[in-house]
Every structure is written in C-alpha cells, then in structure tokens.
C-alpha cells in the first residue's frame, strides 16, 4: 500500500525539492514517518530506522541522495535516457574538459565550490560530491576517496611598516 500511494509521490521531483532547507522538509518527513507507523501498527516510541528497514526503503534525505546518484549515472553512462537539455548544456563538466594535464583525476567530475549556502544546495554541486564551502568560505573540502588534494590560497592581509 505504501509503495502504491505514497512512494511514487515522494519520488516525483525529489531531485529538486530535496535540495531545500531541512526545516522545509520537516513536515513531509514527519508525515511519512506517521504513515509508516500507521501502516505497520507501531507505537510512537518505535525508532524510525526500523520503520524504513521493515519496508525496505530509505528515509527522505537518503532517497534524495540516491536519486541524485542515479541522475549522475544516467548522465555518464546513458545520456540518451535524459532530456536533451542536460546533455547539450553540459550539465556536468569533467576535469579533462578543463585542462589537458595528465592527472589521476582527469576523468573525475570537476567540482566547483560555492561561497554561499544557496550554492551548496544546487543539484550540480550536490551531485558532484561537493559539500563544503570553498576558497571564499574559508573551509577546505573534505578528503574524498579518488580525489587529489587541493590547495586553497587564502589572501593575506597587507602589513604596512611605518617608520617613526
């Protein structure tokens, strides 16, 4: 019953609405948890992890991540299954398209880092694996497997020496 009436509505457009702030998704997450509790006749004290595990499904945030990964997989391996706008507009850029250097990561997707929180929620940023602020935000990206370390140059303050 859950997979017939609820699950398709959750999947419809999750790549877009899943990028919103967690506070906006809170009501939807709570409603989904209530539905799972009712369908399974579980008490309020039952852990939500067990509710999802019983139905062999993912929580909304994990479902969003899964759908983004499926989108990237289609883009890389089956672009004919996507609308032409994604393929023609080069929705994702690979490092080998940026430079001609022979590096270990030239076949990886190029990750742009955002200077604000709105940029961190875009599909392009999340699907590429970026998750932290880049040079403008002052935080270094997390070390990812298969990604070469990056060096960020931070502008230093000019020091004036005044002779008295």
Image (cartoon, rainbow, N blue to C red):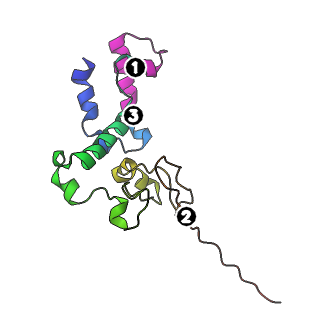
Is residue 65 placed above or below 140 in the rendered structure? above
Q: Which residue is mark 3?
A: 62
- Give the crowd class for mark 2: few <14, some 14-19, many >=20 residues within 10 Å: few
Q: Which residue has dot 1 on it?
A: 53
Separation (CA) of disc 3 from disc 1? 13 Å
Q: Is residue 107 magenta?
A: no
Disc marking residue 152? 2
Mark closer to the observer (1, 2): 2
Residue that protrudes farthest toward the front in the picture: 102
The answer for how far apart the CA atoms under marks 2 and 3 are is 30 Å
- Determine the secondary structure under disc 1: helix
> In the image, residue 106 lies at what x, y percent?
39, 59
Residue that appears at 16% across and 54% down: 84
The crowd level at tag 3 (other Cα within 10 Å; few <14, some 14-19, many 20+) is few
**Residue ID at (34%, 50%):** 123
What is the C-alpha distance between the residues marked 1 and 2?
Answer: 41 Å
**For this rendering, which residue is in front, 118 or 55?**
55
Residue at left offset 44%, top offset 11%: 43
Which region shows up in magenta? 27-51
Closest to the observer, 144 or 136: 144
In the rendered view, tell whether residue 20 sits above or below residue 138.
above
Crowding near pointer 1: few (<14 within 10 Å), some, many (20+)?
A: few
Q: Earlier in the sequence, mark 2 or mark 3?
A: 3
SS under mark 3: helix
């Amino acid at each position: 019953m859950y997979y017939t009436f609820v699950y398709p509505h959750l999947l419809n457009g999750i790549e877009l609405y899943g990028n919103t702030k967690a506070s906006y998704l809170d009501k939807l997450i709570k409603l989904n948890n209530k539905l799972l509790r009712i369908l399974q006749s579980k008490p309020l004290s039952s852990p939500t992890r067990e509710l999802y595990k019983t139905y062999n499904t993912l929580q909304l945030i994990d479902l969003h991540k899964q759908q983004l990964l499926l989108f990237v997989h289609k883009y890389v391996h089956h672009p004919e299954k996507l609308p032409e706008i994604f393929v023609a507009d080069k929705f994702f850029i690979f490092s080998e398209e940026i430079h001609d250097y022979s590096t270990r990561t030239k076949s990886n997707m190029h990750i742009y880092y955002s200077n604000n929180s709105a940029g961190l929620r875009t599909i392009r940023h999340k699907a590429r694996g970026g998750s932290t602020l880049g040079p403008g935000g002052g935080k270094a990206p997390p070390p990812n497997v298969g990604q070469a370390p990056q060096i960020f140059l931070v502008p230093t303050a000019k020091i004036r020496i005044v002779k008295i």
